[in-house]
Amino acid sequence: MRVAFDARPVTDGGGIGRYARCMLDALLTTAPDGSELIPTHRPRRRVDVFHSPWMDGTPLRPTCPTVVTIHDLHHLKRRGEAMRSGMRFKLRRLAIERATRIIVPTEAVAADAVELLRLSDAHIVVIPEAAAPSLSRRPPDEVKRTRERYGLPDDYLLWVGGMEHPDPRKRIADLASAPRNLPLVLVGSTSRWVEELQGVTLTGHVPDDDLAAIYTGARALVFPSDDEGFGLPAVEALACGTPVVACDVPALREVLADRATFVARHDVAGLLAAAERAQRPAPPPPSWSWDDAAQATWAVYVEARAAG
């Protein structure tokens, strides 16, 4: 079986980029005998299946069975964002309807896909994500050096994610302005709007070794989102031994279960207070790995080829 994988998102600094990089590596590692994975969004040779790891890469006129990964559908839940997406999303939605199989990271996103996109649940497969192998607990001397490199305090609360564009569901501005006793560190690619926030420390995008040390050194990861598709930073934090405090939304509850402290969805002040009380050791992350995800994805390719 020959599979074309759209590798364009691997350069993205956010969650889709993380998914594409980890999934591509794991697919190459776990490829069944006789299978070939071709990293391209324009296969020039005959392939059996095409996989787009993001909605934007879904072909409108597929020439072979297509698998597409949908990470979340938050923009369809906010009327303003849905209206702004206009014709572009209408075409993307049509492309998704023509896909042979849809991969989602949680049952919560699967339910959204059925409700908001009117997709058949028979075509949807839930495959969870995982922390990258490079993200693990780091020793104190490495944590100390990393703190010094980025000018971080000895004790801090942490938020991790992309900040190139304002995203109302992430509530970063609310997090920055809420009362707290510990410094707040924001890690991820930035832009002007977030650089104008007061009372926070910005690191920008950091390599995985530094990210693991920053996770390890934090009092807790704070997750104020009012909607999520999976919540990968929370799993990454647990892999580094860091407690997680999150707002209680379906996907996070599904993924984290009793591994995190949950507060009411709109209680940002309560979230910060609970994070300041967090104690180590944090529970271990879910045992699911990227190799597990890749093997499940190869099985989806077999299904898609047969259905196509």
Image (spheres, grey):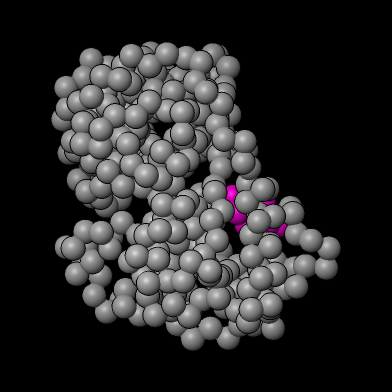
Nearer to us in this view, 284 or 115: 115
Quarter of the figure with residue 112: bottom left
Q: Position of residue 300 (x, y in %)?
A: 64, 65
Q: Residue 22 location in percent, x, y? A: 59, 50
Measuring 21% from the left and 19% from the top, which residue is drawn there?
180
Q: Is residue 282 visible?
A: yes
The quadrant in which residue 219 appears is: top left
Q: Where does the magenta region start and end? A: 22-28
Q: Residue furthest right?
A: 33
Q: Quadrant of the C terminus?
A: bottom right
Which residue is located at x 23 percent, y 24 percent? 270
Residue 37 included in the magenta stretch of the image: no
Q: Position of residue 96 (x, y in %)?
A: 44, 74
Determine the residue positioned at 68% across, 62% down: 298
x then y, percent, for residue 30? 74, 54
Left or right of 65 in this view: 193 = left
Q: Main secondary structure of the magenta part?
A: helix
Q: Nearer the viewer, residue 47 or 140?
A: 47
26 inside magenta stretch: yes
Q: Is residue 49 visible?
A: no
